Amino acid sequence: MKKIYKDIETAKKTYLGDKKYKLQKIHLSLVDDFNKKLEILKDFDKFYGSRIVKLRNTYLQASSIITDIKDLYQDSISDTKEAKELVNEIVEIVDKIAKATKEIGLDVNDVKGMNEVTKVVANIEDDIDTFEQTENDYEKIIKSI
């Protein structure tokens, strides 16, 4: 009977020993997998964190640019209206000066500032044209955001 118990104990130890060995093997395999995944996760953390920071910074820059576009667009509308009024006012004055100088036999270009006013008005009219040619584009962009 002792022999049977001894054989049972030996069998248990062998069986349990194999089982423990297999569990240790599984455990070591899991630890290896864990360590590999941890390294991948740490690398991903650096990459992902960097990308999120870059996205946030780009978003903030874009938000600032969008605000600037909206503000500049509104300012340009007001400025264009004012520019047209100023040009019309100066043209009326130039016309009056031209008539007056003609009546007294002088050349309008002899009046100080006449050559300069022509250049300034031309520059302003070019700026007005540039704005008006692209105004619809600005409106579309602003409405889309």
Image: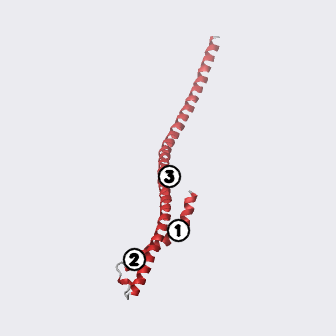
Dot 2 or dot 3: first in sequence order is 3
Relative image position of residue 133 (x, y in whole percent)? 53, 70
Residue 102, numbered circle: none
Task: Identify which residue is drawn at 58% across, 29% down.
Answer: 22
- Colour scheme employed for the rendering of this structure: secondary structure
Secondary structure under tag 2 reads helix
Please determine whether, in this image, residue 15 is positioned above or below residue 1: below
Image position of 89 (left or right of 33): left
Task: Identify which residue is drawn at 50% across, 52% down.
Answer: 59
Secondary structure under tag 3 reads helix
Residue 117, numbered circle: 2
Q: Are marks 3 and 1 in contact (CB under 8 Å)?
A: no
Please determine whether, in this image, residue 145 is positioned above or below residue 17: below
Of 138 and 105, nearer the camera is: 105
Q: In this rendering, which labeled residue sits more in front, label 2 or label 3?
A: 2
Dot 3 or dot 1: first in sequence order is 3
Amino acid at the residue labelled 1? Thr
Of 50 and 119, nearer the camera is: 119
Of 138 and 106, nearer the camera is: 106
Residue 134, numbered circle: 1
Please determine whether, in this image, residue 138 is positioned above or below residue 10: below
Q: In this rendering, which labeled residue sits more in front, label 3 or label 1?
A: 1
Task: Identify which residue is drawn at 38% across, 79% down.
Answer: 114
Dot 1 or dot 2: first in sequence order is 2
Image position of 120 (left or right of 70): left
Relative image position of residue 124 (x, y in whole percent)? 44, 72
Amino acid at the residue labelled 2? Val
For label 3, the residue is: 59
Amino acid at the residue labelled 3? Tyr
Secondary structure under tag 1 reads helix
